[in-house]
Image (cartoon, rainbow, N blue to C red):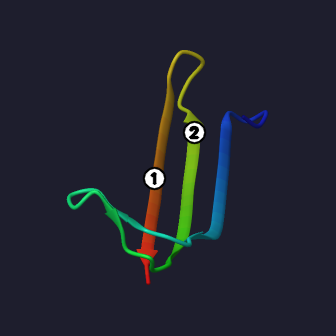
Amino acid sequence: MAENGTGFHAHVEAGSVNDSNVNIADLDRSSEQADNATLINAGIDGDLALSKQLTLKAGFAYSDTAHQ
């Protein structure tokens, strides 16, 4: 938190994953096909000191996995 009692933080993460042989749990077999996915995570957080005894904090997070 900054000296005036306010603070802000943001983050973004992105990536991709690959599974070269996807398993089908319901059939207990492998598909022998690959699966790719794109991942993204983002968020913001902030706080505001309203007084010495009271600080307001808020945040928002977003996460998504997109399979291809």
Q: Residue furthest left?
A: 26
Q: Position of residue 55 (x, y in %)?
A: 52, 28
Question: Element at badge 1?
Answer: strand
Crowd tier of the residue under label 2, counting other residues whose Cα lies within 10 Å: few below 14, some 14–19, many 20 or above: some
Please give the residue where the numbered disc 1 appears in the rendered image.
60
Could you tell me which residue is drawn at 53 percent across and 31 percent down?
Answer: 50
Question: Element at badge 2?
Answer: strand
Q: Is residue 11 left or right of residue 63?
A: right
**Spatial separation of the CA atoms under disc 2 and disc 1:** 12 Å
Which of discs 2 and 1 lies nearer the camera? The answer is 1
In the rendered view, tell whether residue 25 sits above or below residue 20.
above
Q: Nearer the viewer, residue 10 or 63?
A: 63
Could you tell me which residue is drawn at 56 percent across and 72 percent down?
Answer: 20
Question: What's the mark number on residue 30?
Answer: none
Crowd tier of the residue under label 1, counting other residues whose Cα lies within 10 Å: few below 14, some 14–19, many 20 or above: few
Q: Nearer the viewer, residue 27 or 60?
A: 27
In the rendered view, tell whether residue 24 sits above or below residue 9.
below
Q: Position of residue 60 (x, y in %)?
A: 45, 53
Q: Residue furthest right?
A: 3
State the quadrant of the N terminus: top right
Q: Which mark sits nearer the N-terminus, 2 or 1?
A: 2
Q: Nearer the viewer, residue 12 or 22?
A: 22
Quarter occupied by residue 62? bottom left
Mark 1: amino acid: Phe
Q: Nearer the viewer, residue 36 or 34?
A: 34
Please give the residue where the numbered disc 2 appears in the rendered image.
47
Quarter occupied by residue 47? top right
Could you tell me which residue is drawn at 79 percent across and 33 percent down?
Answer: 3
Mark 2: amino acid: Asp
